[in-house]
Every structure is written in structure tokens, then in C-alpha cells.
Amino acid sequence: MSCFYTSLKSLYGSKQDLLCQLLDSDYCHYKSTLFYVTCTFYSRLMEFFRTINAKTDENMIKTILDLHHLELMSSQLFLLEPLSDDLVGIGSLWGEFTLTRQEIKGGLRFSLLECPNALTWTITTGYEPAPESIIVHLTINRTEKDQEFLEEIKDFLDDHTGFLKRTFDSKDNPQRMNVDH
């Protein structure tokens, strides 16, 4: 248990009281030792979505989008140092970071490890809200950011989805694409 959590718990008494206070919810219900928090807080989350109308599958996303071919994904990410198959040093609009790549159900998750905003995005297909399309979902760990940073995120997503659309719509791609692995 973290010192931060322990301090907060001492102020609010229980985990349930703490969550209700943090979420500012009138809909906290207790049931035996379990607790349920019901509230809508999407408006307080920083998450961004893009849908790409391109037909592909989970395996093709995982095969084509590796960290050694960032040029297939974006003009705003630059390979600086390969560290492993799923970890590279990159340069970006926001500085230098370690970029990770994780295989997940439906596609891939990418994360900037040193990013103070914990910027992470997924590229998936085969599931709602658009199972026949590619979904790019980006999140940061803030509830508010200045407008300039939000515009930079939107520009990154527009660039990223444009490159992904070209990559997966290409006549040379996806099956016949010549990518050195």
C-alpha cells in the first residue's frame, strides 16, 4: 500500500469513502465487503479516438507495425536507438522517450515510458465500435491540459491515422508489403 494511499485513507476512513470523494459521486453503493461506484466521468478523462476505414485483421496489425518501421505509422516519430524488438528510443514533437510496443487482444498498445502525461495509444480492429475498421485510441493521465498540447495530440493523431490508412490501403500492402524483419 502506497504512502499516498495510506494518507488519503486516514483522511477519508475507508476505500469506499475515498473513491466516493475522489469521484464526487452521489451514486456510491455499498454491498457487504464489496463496493460499487457508478458514475459517468468520461468528460473528465483525456482520451481521443480515430476510426480508420481500412480492412485488416489483428495479425496484420501485429506483423506490419513494428518499432523498426515507424515511418509506416507517423511522420512525427523518429527512431533514435533500437533497444529490443518491443522497446526503442525515439524522438518526437514532445522530446525523446522510450517507446514500448505490446501485443494486445485486437492489435497493439504503444506507450511513451518517460512521458509525464503517460501518453499511450492502441491500434486495434475486430471489436466495437467499428469491428470492420481500425480504431486508434489515445489516452493521457490528466483531466485537463492546455489547448496547445491538446492541438498537438490531435495533430499527432491526424498524422498517425493518415499514415496508418496509407499503410493498410496501399496496393503493396498488407500481404505483399516488403518489410525487413
Image: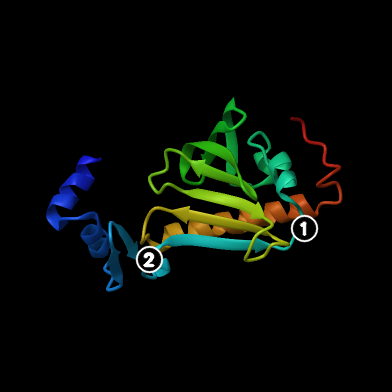
* Percent coordinates x, y for residue 60 in the rendering: 75, 45
- Could you tell me which quadrant the C terminus lies in? top right
In the rendered image of this protein, does residue 114 appear above or below residue 56?
Answer: above
> How far apart are the two marked residues, 2 and 1, measured between alpha carbons?
32 Å
Horizontal side, residue 154 vs residue 61: left or right? left
- Residue 69 screen position, x and y as percent: 68, 37
In percent of the image, x 61 and y 59: which residue is there?
A: 158
From the viewer's perspective, is 154 left or right of 58?
A: left
Q: Is residue 90 above or below residue 75?
A: above
Q: Which residue is mark 2?
A: 44
Residue 49 occupies quadrant: bottom right
Among the two numbered marks 2 and 1 on one chain, the one whose residue lies closer to the N terminus: 2
Q: Residue furthest left?
A: 11
Classify mark 2: residues with Cα within 10 Å, few (<14), some (14-19) or many (20+). Answer: few
Residue appearing at x 84%, y 44% in the figure: 175
Q: At x 60% / y 34%, what residue is drawn? A: 79
Q: Circle 1: is it few (<14), some (14-19), or many (20+) Cα within 10 Å?
A: some
Task: Give the amino acid type for the residue marked by disc 2 in the picture.
Answer: Arg
Marks 2 and 1 in Cβ contact (< 8 Å)? no
User: What amino acid is found at the position of numbered circle 1 in the picture?
Assistant: Lys
Residue drawn 38% across and 67% down? 41
Residue 125, above or below 43: above
Kindly identify which residue carries mark 1. 55
**Residue 147 horizontal side relative to residue 159, left or right:** left
